[in-house]
Image: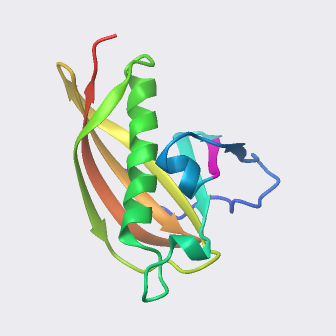
Amino acid sequence: MNTQPPEHSLSSTENPWREHTLPGLMGCLGPMLTRREPQGWAYGLKLRADHLNQAGVAHGGTLTTLLDQALSAIAWQHAGKQPCVTVQLNTSFLHAARLHQELIARGCVTHTTGSLIFMTGTLHADDQLIATAQAIMKRLKA
């Protein structure tokens, strides 16, 4: 699991981010940003006011949704682009993220068994690790 802070911000011109408008919940949270890195894919989101809770920090649901989307996409790629669904997602919140911060999610596959894919992930806000995740994804039959 990569626990190091992001190499570049979302606004970096080196290794630029690609913007995606996705359907469903991610369409409401997005746009989703993606970037290929040496260790794999990174997924980004710039925090807006509608991502915050009543305390003025990023809502846990926003953070968990971004982690779930990132880990699902990594599982999909690992599974040869077969659809995958989340069986379990455990998230540990370590620090708060605030308005206008850049969230960057990364993840990796730790092992697979049959149709299950076991994963870990990290979520940074700017240079600070704010959440970690462990997930189990299930490959669906084509």
When the figure is inspected, residue 17 is found, relative to residue 29, above or below; the finding is above
Q: At x 47% / y 75%, what residue is drawn?
A: 58
Q: Is the magenta stretch mostly helix, strand or loop?
A: strand
Q: Residue pushed farthest top?
A: 142
When the figure is inspected, residue 47 is found, relative to residue 64, above or below; the finding is below
Quarter of the image for residue 110 reads top left
For the question of whether residue 14 can be seen, the reply is yes
Q: At x 65% / y 43%, what residue is drawn?
A: 21
When the figure is inspected, residue 113 is found, relative to residue 62, above or below; the finding is above
Q: At x 48% / y 61%, what residue is drawn?
A: 4
For the question of whether residue 2 can be seen, the reply is no
Q: Position of residue 76 (x, y in %)?
A: 41, 27
Q: Residue 8 or 79: which is nearer the viewer?
A: 79
Quarter of the image for residue 118 reads top left
Q: Position of residue 80 (x, y in %)?
A: 42, 16
Q: Residue pushed farthest left?
A: 113
Considering the image in quadrants, where does the C terminus appear? top left
Magenta span contains residue 34: yes
127 lies left or right of 119: right
Q: Where is residue 3 in the image (x, y as percent from the top left)?
A: 42, 60
Extent of the magenta region: 31-35
Magenta span contains residue 63: no
80 lies left or right of 135: right
